[in-house]
Amino acid sequence: MSKPELCLVFHEENCIQCSACETACKIWNRVDCGISYRRVLNIWRGDFPNISSATLSLSCLHCVQPACLQVCPVQAVFKSSENGAVLVNEQECTGCEACFEACPFDVPQFREDGKMVKCTACIDKDYAPPCITTCPTNALELQAIPALQKGEFEAAMLALYKEYKSR
């Protein structure tokens, strides 16, 4: 059995689209303007007059088999053997954007200097992820889960994201 990996679990049924998670992440991580490590997305379903919506709070999923890691020509993207977090060595990044093209969630973003940046799950901080601690409805939580279960979560999130992009 594989070692459990960190997973930023999103509970869609609890999300009220307040964007507190997105705002807290930007503030606490001092994220540059134009870059968002976490995005709150509204997914419209149906046609008038039968319309409904769903929500997706999306950041890096720290995937079990990260596509960004597999395509990085200089191995600037790596996966922590300790907790499964997918991280980037910004000094090694060449800004080729292969990671962005490979990521099915469009997570990698690039600073003005061309270096890739993304969610780190705040594992490098002395505090819990602000996206989680700020959420008033407990729609987000950080869990250590088996790779198989994490893969199932990734698949469910990808289905929601594809639905969002198709509208």
Image: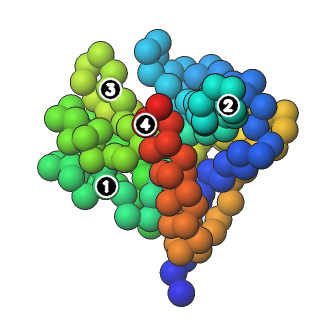
**Quarter-wise, where is residue 129 in the image?**
top right
Q: Which residue, given by chain and number where applicable, does mark 1 sit on?
A: 67
The relative height of residue 163 versus residue 53 in the rendered view (above or below) is below
**Quarter-wise, where is residue 121 in the image?**
top right
Q: Which residue, given by chain and number where applicable, does mark 4 sit on?
A: 166
How far is the residue under mark 1 from the one under mark 4? 21 Å
Residue at point 59%, 71% (across, down): 149
How far is the residue under mark 2 from the one under mark 1? 34 Å
Residue 75 spot, x, y in % from top left? 22, 52
**Which label sits on residue 110?**
3
**Which label sits on residue 1?**
none
The kind of secondary structure element at disc 1 is helix
Q: Are the two marked residues, 1 and 4, in contact with CB atoms closer than 8 angstroms?
A: no
The kind of secondary structure element at disc 4 is helix
Q: Which of marks 3 and 2 is in front?
A: 2
Along the line of sight, the residue nearer the viewer: 98 or 16: 16
Q: Nearer the viewer, mark 1 or mark 3?
A: 1
What type is the residue that disc 1 sits on? Ala
